[in-house]
Image: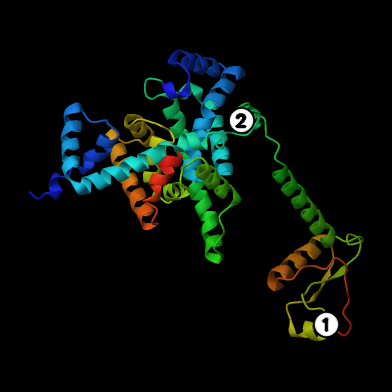
Amino acid sequence: MGSCGISVEQLSDLIERGRQGEEAACAALYHQFSPLLMRLCLGLLGDLQDAEEVTQDSFVYALRNLKRFDASRSAFPTWLYTIALSRCRNKRRRKLLVQLPLELLSSEAPKHQDRLVELTLARRGVHQQVWQALQALRPELREAVALRYLGQMRYKEIGEALACNPKTAESRVRLGLEQLRQALRQRGIEGELDLVDQWA
Amino acid sequence: MGLTAQHPRDELLGWVEKRLSPADQRRVGRHVAGCPACQAEAADLLRLNESLSALPAALRGLANPSGKSWSNVWARVQGVPVRRWGAQLNLGLSLAVIFFVIAAAFPAGLANEPVNVTVGAAQTPAAMQTTPAASTVAAPDPLEASTALAVNQRATGARALPVPTPIPGLKG
């Protein structure tokens, strides 16, 4: 994976050494891939603390099960993303069970960390409404869109991570974009996207 | 076949991302050039595509694991329990509560002589008379005392008083 800044040979070497329990190799894998994984988790969960927790859990599982990784079946980042996706789904499910009764009692103000993400994105030229609309997508569409844009994966890899064929993965991304477009139109910020692009 | 059926909507994203074959890219491009509806949709897709593509760079620095995260991860991989102050505090509180309950159920001298364990939410004689479930139990030994206490607590929902308090005017 070129975007990771590491060659295939280096990655294979790190994985092999990691399988033998070498801490330096495992640390190198962690430092190389944890930001990518956390970015994806943040896109899926919308919460920095949850994203970090799931990233750590995913790496604990991955490093304990490095022997199960089969390079002939998927790329290493795809394997990591698959592990993280499953944990993100569990996290969302658990949070939903806890949050629903609370939300029935009171309309909770947006959490400080959520605001931090939105404000940081706004400062860097991404409209917070785009982020909010992404969070509001149906889970299967959000996963596809997050893998495409936050994971920067190809449709073939998205298909592997979501256990579907590349065409289905592309359809989900397209449907996700269509729903994002409609959501932004409803919020009346369609025209503002032009300004955002100019800031970026 | 109407005009709508000819809109290459399924191919628009591929066209915007320039993933179609050269021939398809040209074909869709020709259609978009002459179709205002597809032009509008392609423009939206292009803007969204650019906004979403800017997310990874915008999240750089923000979505980074904290400094101590690797040591936590490695400790867990090795099977070393990670110290969690919240869990330890909860355990300490739970132990304190259990100790308090035991201390309340077994006051000094309980093991040697029968005691009157008074259970009830209301403390005035009048109120006690209106709550028959709250009663005074003569307990011959500690085990029986604690059993009677538990039964009464279940029945009344009241908590035990640590010191026996005889109530004037109320007969056992």
Seen in the picture, residue B89 relative to A30 is either above or below; the reply is below
Q: Which of B65 and B159 is in front in this view?
A: B65
Q: Which of A160 and A155 is in front in this view?
A: A155
Q: Nearer the viewer, residue A108 or B47?
A: B47
Return the x and y of residue B50 as percentages of the image width and height. Answer: 38, 38
Return the x and y of residue A105 as percentages of the image width and height. Answer: 56, 66
Disc 1 secondary structure class: loop
Q: Name the residue under label 2.
A: B73
Return the x and y of residue A96 as percentages of the image width and height. Answer: 50, 53
As shown in the figure, which amino acid type bears the numbered disc 2? Answer: Val
Q: Which of marks 1 and 2 precedes in the sequence?
A: 2
Seen in the picture, residue A53 relative to A111 is either above or below; the reply is above
Disc 2 secondary structure class: helix
Q: Which residue is drawn at 83% across and 79% down?
A: B172
- The chain ID associated with circle 2 is B
Name which quarter of the figure residue B99 lies in: bottom right
- The chain ID associated with circle 1 is B
As shown in the figure, which amino acid type bears the numbered disc 1? Answer: Thr
Q: Nearer the viewer, mark 2 or mark 1?
A: 2
Seen in the picture, residue A103 relative to B168 is either above or below; the reply is above
2 and 1 marks on the same chain: yes
Does residue A177 appear left or right of residue A55 in this picture? left
Q: Which residue is drawn at 11% across and 49% down?
A: B3
**Residue A43 in sight here:** yes
Q: Residues within 10 Å of mark 2 (few under 14, many from 20)?
A: many
Give me the disc on residue B161. none
**Residue A1 in sight here:** no
Q: Mark 1 points at which residue?
A: B124
Seen in the picture, residue A41 relative to B147 is either above or below; the reply is above
